[in-house]
Each structure stands twice: as C-alpha cells, then as structure tokens.
Image (cartoon, rainbow, N blue to C red):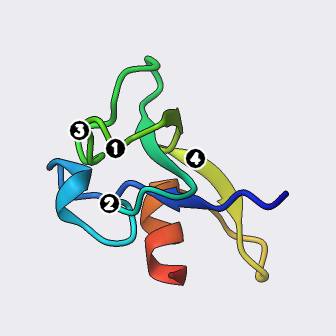
Amino acid sequence: MRVSATAAGNDNKNADLFSPARASTGVTVGATDKHDKRAFFSNHGPRVDVYAPGDGIQSTFINGLEVSRSFQHWSALKN
C-alpha cells in the first residue's frame, strides 16, 4: 500500500482552496511552530489530516552552511 503526503500550503488559508492539498487521497500535512501550534503561514481546515514541525527547521546544504527555514516552503518548491 502506498500513501502520499502533500504539504497543506503556506497561504494561511483553507487548504480546500489549493491543489494538491484539496485532493481526497493521501495525507495532507500542515506545519506547526516551536510551540506545537499551527504555524502562522500554514494552510488549515478539514482537509488537513495531520500537523508536523515545519517552522525554523535546521538543515544543511551541500556547501555545509546551516540554515533555518520553513520546511513546508522547501517542500512546496520541490513540487
């Protein structure tokens, strides 16, 4: 069985308004902040199945620089 995860989006609006988050298949994931509250930018609504950490995530790039960015912003860029 395959399950697809989709970012809810970063518009602080109802995820039902955006594709692919509005699709009824898969799992739509919204973002939380460091206080485990919905991140101010995360789309929301009944289509969001689960929330996960998505703001201020530490990561590295190939050149070794560390950055802190919105995880969902990165995933939206890759879609």
Compared across the picture, whether 53 is left or right of 15 comes to right
Q: Which residue is mark 4?
A: 57
Q: Which residue is mark 3?
A: 40
- For the residue labelled by badge 1, is the local secondary structure a helix, a strand or a loop? loop
Across and down, in percent, residue 8 comes to 38, 54
Tell me what residue is drawn at x 38 percent, y 61 percent.
21
Q: Considering only vertical position in the picture, is 60 above or below 70?
A: below
The circle drawn on residue 34 is: none
Q: Residue furthest right?
A: 1
Dot 1 or dot 3: first in sequence order is: 3
Distance between the alpha carbons at the discs numbered 2 and 3: 19 Å
Note whether residue 69 is visible: no
Q: Mark 2: which amino acid?
A: Arg
Q: Considering only vertical position in the picture, is 41 above or below 53?
A: below
Q: Mark 3: which amino acid?
A: Phe
Asked whether the residues under the numbered discs 4 and 1 touch, taking CB atoms below 8 Å apart as contact, a structural biologist would say no
